[in-house]
Every structure is written in structure tokens, then in C-alpha cells.
């Protein structure tokens, strides 16, 4: 069953075509990796799904056209988005941020922070620039885990993270999926596809092939590392 369908999605910025008639289907319950080199439009795709950037085409969530819905309304339908570089917020404590989309008490929030490798004491820290990019990414992942979304779009969750932490993040994504969240995982690193149930190769603003993670990895190595298809 399709949870998410993208139909003829196009994005243009400053006269340049970023997404070019992109089509994609994501099955309910999958960890679906979008694999592609930097600059092919992967982050723009994530922004379009969340409704942050303007686009043409249709986005269907569970047979409902959400193309004209705001970011807030998409979030209410169960879509969550982790940016490649999560934002910081002056004056908001981490526990307050995690609680925005969840009903967790402070002890549950601390346990969730521990899951993503952050000390319990971080619940009282502010979500500002005193945190590293990697720490903000962990907080964002903790917030997504706490909210139990229907669909999580994770943009480069492995970037800026050391290899030990990458393995931890992969385990957390699998746990998130096991608990009922369909995941769209955007990356340019082949090794992250090891947790995927399905993968798609993105080149030049389009999905050029979808299939098994193994087959898409082979195609990525062969045809799409800096090449134009």
C-alpha cells in the first residue's frame, strides 16, 4: 500500500530547474532511501514534501492530495522532517522542544535523549548555538521519536556524525520504523542503505530508478557518481 506518492514534482529557483517532473512511490512501513550525489535536488525534495518550498505537481498522502496544505497541516497529518542542518531556537529548552509534538513527561524525555546518545542533563539545556550541529541533529531525532509520526523525512541524518554514532543512528531509525513510522531517508552515502527496505536513485532532479538497496547501490556506483543520466 502506498503511503506517499509524488507525481510530476518540479521546482525552479532563480531560473534553474532543481526538480524536474519527479515521480516517487513510498510504501507504508518501508525505510525508503533516496540515494544521490550532492546537488541533485535531494534536500529540495524533502522541503517540497514538507511544504516548505513551492513546487508544481501533486503530493498524495494515503490517497489524499495534500499539495495545497500548509506545513502545519501536513505536520498534523503525521509528517515530520529532520533537516540536514537542524535549526537552533533561542530561549527554548530541549525538554520544551521535544514536548511540542509529544505527551512525554520529563523522565520519558530524558530516556529519549539517552537513546540518541545525549545525557539526561541536556533536557535543561537551550536549543541554541551552544550545541554542535551533531547535537542539534540528535535532539531533532529525539523529537521525531517522541512524536511517533506516520512519516519521517530524514535529510542526511548521517552527515557530520562520527562512525560510532552513525551505527547508533541507524539502530534508532530501525527502531522508529519498527514502531510504525514509514521513513524516507535521504543520503549520499551508500553504507546507510544497509537499513533500507527499498531505495531510489536520484540524478538531475529526477528519480531514475527504484528497487532493492543492493541494486540501487550498484547503479549509483556505476552511473551516478558525478555522471548525468
Image (tube, rainbow, N blue to C red):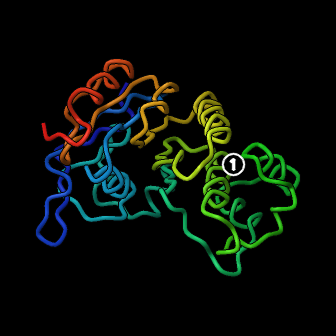
Dividing the picture into quadrants, the one containing residue 137 is bottom right
| Position above or below: 225 against 125 | above
Q: How many marks?
A: 1
Tell which of 74 and 13 is nearer to you. 13
Q: Residue at x 69, y 65 (%)?
A: 97
| Position above or below: 91 against 61 | below
- Percent position (x, y) of residue 149? 56, 44
Q: Residue at x 26, y 42 (%)?
A: 6
What is the quadrant of the N terminus in the image? top left
Query: Which residue is the extreme one toward the bottom?
Result: 91
Q: Residue at x 60, y 48 (%)?
A: 161
Taking the image as shown, residue 47 lies to the left or right of residue 86, namely left
What is the quadrant of the C terminus in the image? top left
Taking the image as shown, residue 95 lies to the left or right of residue 81, namely right
- Percent position (x, y) of residue 61? 36, 42
Q: Residue at x 66, y 74 (%)?
A: 128
- Residue named by callout 1: 146
Dividing the picture into quadrants, the one containing residue 171 is top right
Taking the image as shown, residue 129 lies to the left or right of residue 13, namely right
Question: Mark 1: few, some, or many residues within 10 Å (few <14, many ≥20)?
Answer: many
Q: Which element type, helix, strand or loop, lies under badge 1?
A: helix
Tell which of 178 and 62 is nearer to you. 178
- Percent position (x, y) of residue 207? 22, 37
Amino acid at each position: 500500500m502506498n503511503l506517499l506518492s509524488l507525481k510530476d514534482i518540479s521546482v525552479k529557483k532563480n531560473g534553474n530547474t532543481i526538480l524536474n517532473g519527479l515521480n516517487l512511490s513510498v510504501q507504508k512501513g518501508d525505510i525508503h532511501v533516496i540515494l544521490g550525489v550532492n546537488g541533485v535536488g535531494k534536500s529540495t525534495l524533502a522541503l517540497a514534501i514538507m511544504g516548505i518550498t513551492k513546487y508544481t505537481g501533486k503530493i498524495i498522502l494515503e490517497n489524499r492530495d495534500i499539495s495545497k496544505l500548509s506545513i502545519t497541516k501536513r505536520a498534523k497529518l503525521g509528517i515530520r522532517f529532520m533537516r540536514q542542518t537542524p535549526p537552533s531556537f533561542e530561549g527554548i529548552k530541549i525538554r520544551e522542544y521535544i514536548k511540542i509534538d509529544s505527551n512525554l513527561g520529563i523522565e520519558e524525555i530524558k530516556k529519549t535523549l539517552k537513546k540518541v546518545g545525549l545525557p539526561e542533563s541536556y533536557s535543561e539545556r537551550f536549543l541554541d548555538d551552544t550545541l554542535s550541529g551533531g547535537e542539534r541533529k540528535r535532539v531533532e531525532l529525539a523529537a521525531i521519536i517522541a512524536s511517533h509520526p506516520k512519516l519521517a523525512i530524514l535529510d542526511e541524518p548521517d552527515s557530520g556524525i562520527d562512525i560510532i554514532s552513525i551505527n547508533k543512528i541507524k539502530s534508532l531509525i530501525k527502531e522508529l520504523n519498527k514502531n510504525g513510522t514509514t521513513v524516507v531517508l535521504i543520503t549520499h552515502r551508500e553504507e546507510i542503505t544497509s537499513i533500507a527496505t527499498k531505495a531510489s536513485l536520484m540524478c538531475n532532479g529526477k528519480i531514475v530508478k527504484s528497487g532493492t538497496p543492493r541494486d540501487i547501490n550498484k547503479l549509483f556506483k556505476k552511473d551516478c557518481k558525478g555522471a548525468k543520466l
